[in-house]
Amino acid sequence: MILDLRHDVLPAAMGVPIVIVGGGPAGITLALQLEKRGVPSLLLEAGSTRIDAAGQDFYRAASIRPEDHGPVHRYRHRVLGGTSAVWGGRCIPFDPIDFEERPWLSDARWPIRYEELAGYYPEAVAMCRAGSPHFTADLAVTDAAGAGMFDMCDPDLVADRIERFSEPTHFGRFYQERLRQSRAAVVLLNAPVLRVVAHPSGRAVKGVVIAAPDGRRIEVGARAVVVASGALETARLLLSSTDQKSCGLGNERDLVGRFYQSHLEGHVGELRVPPGASSRMDYFRDGDGIYCRRYLWLSPEAQRRERLAGLVLRPTHPKVADPAHGNPVLSAMFLVKGMLLPEYARGMNSTDSAEARRVGKGVPLHLRHLGNVLRGSPGLARFATDWTRRRVLARRKLPSVFLADRDGRYPIDVNAEQEPDRDSRVLLGEARDSLGQQRLVIDWRTSEADLARVARGLAVADRALRRAGAARILLPDPEEAVARLTRVGGHHVGTARMAESPASGVVDGHGEAFDVAGLHVLGAAAFPTSGFANPTLTIVALAVRMADRLAGRMANFRMGRAVNRAA
């Protein structure tokens, strides 16, 4: 059932034991998985089924170093489906090493083992609609191109892993009818949650307070509250929940908002490959028609020996903003960023804004790009026809552009893990939104050690490629190159982290707050580390896992009895 607080009346007695705050991939997955297990829930979504400017304004925040962190309202959407509305669709699971204790990285420890999560990835892949749950090329490649990006077997570099791409699935649109027909999952739109409420002792959750469009404040009771609002809004909500405790809920040890992480990313160096190798770098479709792509990954053995963090390398195209590349397709991309999926267009906006400042700006820059387009118009026309077929008209969309280089020269796109840092945080500021809620101030910190690990990782990868005779990485000045990595700040991780004890985290390994029974955090906010992988697939896997646990604890609220009471 889907209700809208603008014109529907919230039933006085819902008979629903679980309130889910946030209608993105995490919240929608949890609601539907609870339905499968016979447990009703109420999902509260602050937005509607369409994005609007007024709703997006709630996500604006200040940044202490705005040049290092992209505007956060670009990466979040106040709509049913959440950020999946602009998701690029990339699906990569975390790896066992992400869950290991890595003593060379401070505070980089999960309270669960990889094996406790691995069994939930197949269902997560299905929810994301990314095909089979196989992430090695030998199980996905259907042509004669070869399994790995390169024919190599080196202990330091893994060349046969793949990433899978969802359509991309907009969870709000794809699952909307299923939610509408559900007897167990009740979705309430235009229902922003102002705070989570605990019982007078502050030791157990009582419910939430929502802001109705007509100005009323409505308290909704629940045995369990699951905050699934993304890492930034999760921290904001917990810090704003001061009815019982002035520090906010779950924040007795001043850990909510801390250990904020994102990925370090950008173009670093150049990959030189032999003729014929380029065919394995492009996107390909597996036997089910799912787009996949190979990547290069620093092996767990190399990470342990060299004391490094997660690092992945992908060959890419030259920086779009610099017209010196002479490529009509890239110049067209610069002039019309709508050629890319929104996730990659946002990333391009962040990385290319700095590059555009370096090479020029305004009319002269655009004229140089226009010249590239005009000179290469015949080839561009062929590309545009193919792009329209595979990106615009197709339901399952080609994720982005890969352009083969006849000389085998490719800039390297780096995506790297950063070390958790207690002082990297988000906190409440003085500014307020139209509901009177304090806006966030972001103090995202990266370190010289983070950058040094990336430089050393690139050197390890280069040695492995050269040993195999597969390729070379050209990086004249590694330290200078990695210093220019873009802090896009698009993957928000770690503001209410899970841990083995309340001394080092906000929630336990099941996502339940140490100090407030029944209060749960679901999503990347609970990640202790970011790994190198995009977080969405693991978020969805954790949602399936949480549904299992909550269903077991809510045995007395099975669907039949609860829904009958609500009716």
Image: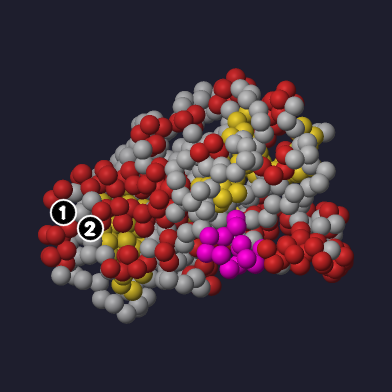
Residue at x-position 32% and y-position 61%: 43
Identify the residue at the far front of this view: 144
Residue at x-position 33% and y-position 74%: 4
Secondary element at tag 1: helix
Q: Is residue 260 visible?
A: no
Kindly identify the amino acid type of the residue bearing the numbered disc 2. Pro
Residue at x-position 81% and y-position 57%: 327
User: Range of the magenta residues?
Assistant: 387-399
Residue sitting nearer the eye, 530 or 281: 281
Which residue bears the numbered disc 1?
557
Kindly identify the amino acid type of the residue bearing the numbered disc 1. Phe
Task: From this view, report whether residue 53 is shown above or below residue 24.
Answer: below
Task: From this view, report whether residue 106 is shown above or below residue 176.
Answer: above
Q: Residues within 10 Å of mark 2 (few under 14, many from 20)?
A: many
Residue sitting nearer the eye, 112 or 499: 112
Residue at x-position 20% and y-position 54%: 38
Q: Position of residue 373 (x, y in %)?
A: 82, 66
Which residue bears the numbered disc 2?
40
Residue sitting nearer the eye, 6 or 387: 387
Q: Position of residue 190 (x, y in %)?
A: 38, 71
Circles 1, 2 touching at the beta carbon (< 8 Å)? yes
- Left or right: residue 121 versus residue 308 is left
Examine the structure image and report whether residue 90 is included in the region drawn in magenta: no
Examine the structure image and report whether residue 391 is included in the region drawn in magenta: yes
Secondary element at tag 2: loop
Q: Residues within 10 Å of mark 1 (few under 14, many from 20)?
A: some
